[in-house]
Amino acid sequence: MMPDRDTCLAAVAGRDARFDGSFFTGVTSTGIYCRPSCPARTPHPRHSTFHPSAAAAQAAGFRACKRCRPDAVPGSAEWDVRADTTARAMRLIGDGVVDREGVEGLAARVGYSVRHLQRLTLVEVGASPIALARAQRAHTARVLLITTGLPLAEVAFAAGFGSIRSFNDTVRAVYAATPSALRAERRGRDRDPRGRSDGSPGDPRPLELSLRLAFRRPFHPSNVFGHLAATAVPGVEEWREGAYRRTLRLPHGPGFVALAPRADHVAATVHLSDPRDLTPVIGRCRRLLDLDADPVAVDAALSADPVLAPLVALAPGRRVPRTVDGDEFALRAVLGQQVSTAAARTHAARLVARYGEPVSDPAGGLTHLFPAAEALTDLPPDALAAPGSRLATLTGLAAALSAGTADLSPGADRDAARAALGTLRGIGPWTLEMIAMRALGDPDAFPAGDLGVRRACARLGVDRAERASRGWRPWRAYATQYLWAVDDHPINRLPEEEPCGTA
């Protein structure tokens, strides 16, 4: 929930970046809205109004500050943590569902009427689903305007606008500038030299662009990137020149992304077959790296435990490595049951080579999309060099995902997904908790039986992990990251890092 007015005033007076994304300040004397940490002169309290989202500030008639760019801050951590209907809807809006399916499609996905969903978001976020999607489109349009040479009409199309007029009106309302004026911010950057894919009017051309993905500090990237690099499936993922690269299955075609940690952001290089997929790519990459987390709140809670406090102090800001595709991770979790990381990669690589969709990587190195669940529902006995029970579990999970019986999308109901997975043969507690943690984004998921967790607890003198973990709620998924780091394994550090001691 948004902080009370006194807290908001104190945060603005102190330019406290910890509140960026938690609320936005509307300044009635100037008509702009800012993030709490904006470096501009602090507005007088009587001229300050506070809004729970950028969309709410825009709906109230404020335009984005040109100094602090409030539309570009990390999103509220609440929407990843919470499991209620509003949070599910916010995650789906972030994935571009409104642009693709409309508000009706969004409402159908969360199981409510359009009217009821609108009431929920207005109360919780201060804006309707349409207003939230409009704010997101405006931000995507600005990114495309200042980082690419796409013609303005194509920018409007790629950002999700239904007409040029709507595009122009929205950009002017949000940024107090025309699209052409925002384009001028490119300051002489070379125009994108690539032409259309086939020259036909309206045909979207491939797009390559570089982005800066913001995060709340502190951010300790080692365990996230180390985990992604160590478990990378050949052909689908790789670690190259300090960046994690992978293929992406997107609504309008395949894509590629390279993600590299930097001191104050994550550098992302994106290749898209259709520019309309930019919004979901940004959302999925942020989700993969857990960039919208509130590390201050998480670490403060975990530091209250004397066992975890030294681990948190040693490397604050650890994130949970998640996924860009819930179905993919669930299938890979089954492949990783009771085998080493290397064996799990080998099993996955064989499935990819045989059943994955071939793609052409502009940078070379990546060859396939991970197989869709539909392709793995009826595998022959020789498809997996593993016990028949493992193959049966894999195909049973694939069938449930394909049929929609188990929903692992960004807007999934976590309790319903757990219940559905729990009925499947071969899905035990470890697999269920790993899927909940990484595919469903449950911050309290805890694989108590995991080998790494058990080893860490033994070294730290914790007799019963499940009992001890009760004091770590609701952040047990983050506690798991600190426990895994006790074992100085390559999976817990960047590939180029040297081993370091642990507390």
Image (cartoon, rainbow, N blue to C red):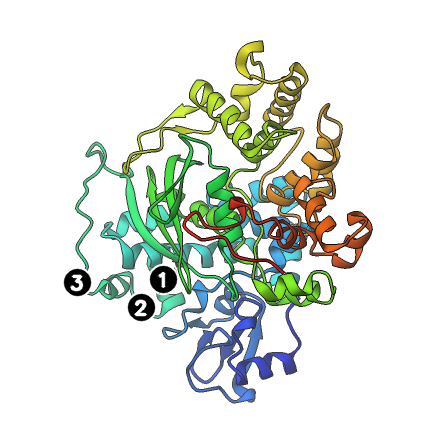
Q: Contact (CB < 8 A) between labels 1 and 2?
A: yes
Inspect the image, locate mark 1, and give the three-letter code of the amino acid beneath it. Val
Position of residue 32 measured from the top left corner of the image (x, y, whole percent): 43, 76
Looking at the rendering, which quadrant does residue 41 occupy? Answer: bottom left
Q: Residue at x 52, y 89 (%)?
A: 44
Which residue was labeled with disc 2? 177
- Identify the disc placed on residue 320: none
Position of residue 203 measured from the top left corner of the image (x, y, whole percent): 27, 36
Q: How many C-alpha atoms fall within 10 Å of the one at disc 2: few (<14), some, or many (≥20)?
A: some
Front residue of 294/486: it is: 486
Front residue of 151/194: it is: 194
The kind of secondary structure element at disc 1 is: helix
The kind of secondary structure element at disc 2 is: loop
Inspect the image, locate mark 2, and give the three-letter code of the amino acid beneath it. Ala
Which residue was labeled with disc 1? 171
Query: 205 above or below 346?
Result: below
Quadrant showing the C terminus: bottom right
Position of residue 226 measured from the top left corner of the image (x, y, whole percent): 49, 47
Position of residue 31 measured from the top left corner of the image (x, y, whole percent): 44, 78
| Residue 283 visible within the image | no
Task: Tell which circle, 3 or 1, labels the residue nearer the N-terminal end.
Answer: 1
Front disc: 3 or 2: 3
Task: Tell which circle, 3 or 2, labels the residue nearer the N-terminal end.
Answer: 2
| Residue 304 visible within the image | yes
Furthest-top residue in this view: 381
Q: Residue at x 72, y 32 (%)?
A: 420
Inspect the image, locate mark 3, and give the three-letter code of the amino acid beneath it. Gly
Cα gap from disc 3 to disc 1, whole angstroms = 21 Å
Which residue was labeled with disc 3? 188
Cα gap from disc 1 to disc 2, whole angstroms = 7 Å
Task: Tell which circle, 1 or 2, labels the residue nearer the N-terminal end.
Answer: 1
From the viewer's perspective, tell me whether residue 239 is left or right of residue 223.
Answer: left
